Image: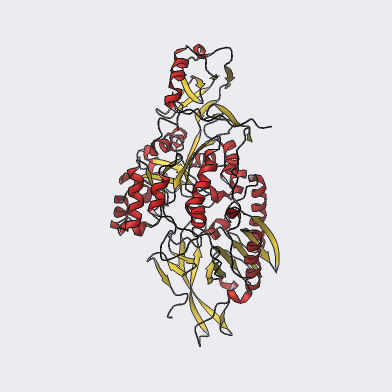
Amino acid sequence: MSEPSPSPLKTWPEAAPRLIAVAAGREPADLVITGGRVVNVHTREVLDWQIAVAEGRFAYVGPDASHCIGEATEIIDAAGRYIIPGLCDGHMHIESGMLTPAEFAAAVIPHGTTTMFTDPHEIANVMGIEGVRLMHDEAALQPVNIYTQMPSCAPSAPGLETTGRAITPEDVAEAMAWPGIIGLGEMMNFPGVIHGDAKMLAEIAATQNAGKTVGGHYASPDLGPAFHAYAAGGPADDHEGTCEDDAIARVRQGMRSMMRLGSAWYDVETQITAVTKRGMDPRNFILCTDDSHSGTLVNDGHMNRVLRHAISCGCEPLIALQMATINTATHFGLERELGSIAPGRRADMILTSDLTTLPIERVFARGVTVAEDGRIAVDCPHLDWPDHARNTVHLGKALVAEDFVIKAPEGKNTVTAKIIGVVENQAPTKALTADMDVTDGIVEPDEAQGIAQIALVERHQGTGGVTNGFVSGFGYTGRMAMASTVAHDSHHMIVVGTSREDMALAANRLGEVGGGITVYKDGKEIALVELPVAGLMSDEPAATVAAKASRMVQAMADCGCTLNNAYMQHSLLALVVIPELRISDLGLVDVTTFELVSLFEDT
């Protein structure tokens, strides 16, 4: 039986009189923890201190809290364990977990995550500012801290894709007044910033005028004048680095380098050497997840997974812990509110018996036990999502195999086609080419070359539109298709397959269930993950969604796929702001030049 969620947290001015009285010994604390080893992330010390909590905040942190104990004070003996701050995720998308904010919170709290900085730009592309507000409102109900960044780029690349809704500078300015908005979400339209696009600069200005943080997203290896122009545009952080030079370049420009370990992004090991070998100031580095699907959350962890990984890459445990706590809080202007075990801060903390392997044995949020031994101990309240948020997949017609036919240019027996090349464990793709045969005027997928077909099916306005192309790297064999309404960032429907008939079946199935992911093999559905909320999320428990996602991953393998976390690669094939080649409802996009290009060369 779970405990009720903590009562609303008092602000520091509201709580200060009692915090002072408890620290002075004039009033008893609500909770005192003795027998623990407090990890001080301000000084990188481990201290045999005690902790007193009142009003959901730390009142006293020092050598002896006995003067804070009264008759009603709860006393917990930490039994020699370390007491570390609750973990903070500096950049993430709740929708990538395929869960609503409530279910995402319930999944990550047992892993020690007590603060998240989230960018709901997935739902913004489907439902606009209304969707952001719904995410913001459910986040505010949770027993942990979920801050919302107002999405900046919907569409992410104007003129290269069509979204269900658009975000405007006026939307950004309005959202800056909402209580849980912490800043502007990742500024993905980096060419717009570099070229002084008025809309992008207006969004940045509205954020800075509100005194809030502008998130960055510079997805280019070019560290020359273009990068410097982007840095001059105001982004305060960036998580798109993939190598040591990227991390160093960002911190040298006064940005925070956010190093991510998500379900498919393994960018910590290649960047943390900026600290471990090059000696850069670790205060400017932050750990994050970016995108973690439900299977990762249930089976592997969340920020505890990232922290363990950073330590395994050679980072000293206390430095890595700073990157997942105080560095993050400081970056967002919340150093006096969270991120450390110090007076006045929210009493978010973890009991663990080892600082390297980091078992998460007990989690407190706002002074209340929220998880113990891997089990959630509080309720995570749900929002009552409106019906139209569960009715967002509009195909306009039943799709048939002919909608996925790729015709060759007139008179061609062979063609040289542009191929989207998937790169394992990385967000960027490769712009490849391949010579392909033509049969009866149609270009077919080529199993021998590892080339499958990809289609982008319009699903917001019901136009019935289908854009076709080719993709390699998944390794699919036989007759199959996989479809998903999670298609960053425009979130139309991506269908990848080797059989046009199965591609039509898969697309129609998602129209029938209101969104999600499905895999077909030889004309039969072999896996389905229903995501009815905006076609992106489920409000079922994480374990239930993870089990369905596990069957989906196995189904992909049964179709010949060998990629690690191939679903994440699938879901990003329409992300037209990350090089090199992507697909959108408007056509094939060369993301090195930000231009629509022909599928075939010399046409």
Residue 560 x/y as whole percent: 64, 64
Residue 113 x/y as whole percent: 53, 37
Question: What residue is drawn where x is 35% and y is 56%?
Answer: 199
Question: What residue is drawn where x is 41% and y is 34%?
Answer: 334
Please tell me how many numbered marks the rendered image carries. Answer: 0
Residue 395, visible in the rendered structure: yes
Residue 447 figure quarter: bottom right
Decide: is 446 above or below 485. below
Residue 481 x/y as whole percent: 63, 66
Q: Is residue 77 left or right of residue 205?
A: right
Task: Quarter of the image for the N terminus: give it.
Answer: top right
Q: Residue furthest bottom?
A: 411
Residue 554, visible in the rendered structure: no
Decide: is 375 above or below 173. above
Question: What residue is drawn where x is 62% and y is 71%?
Answer: 399
Task: Quarter of the image for the C terminus: give it.
Answer: bottom left
- Name the colour scheme: secondary structure
Q: Nearer the viewer, residue 264 or 67?
A: 67
Q: Nearer the viewer, residue 184 or 587?
A: 184
Q: Nearer the viewer, residue 556 or 441?
A: 441
Residue 537 x/y as whole percent: 59, 51
Decide: is 195 above or below 386. below
Q: Residue furthest right?
A: 524
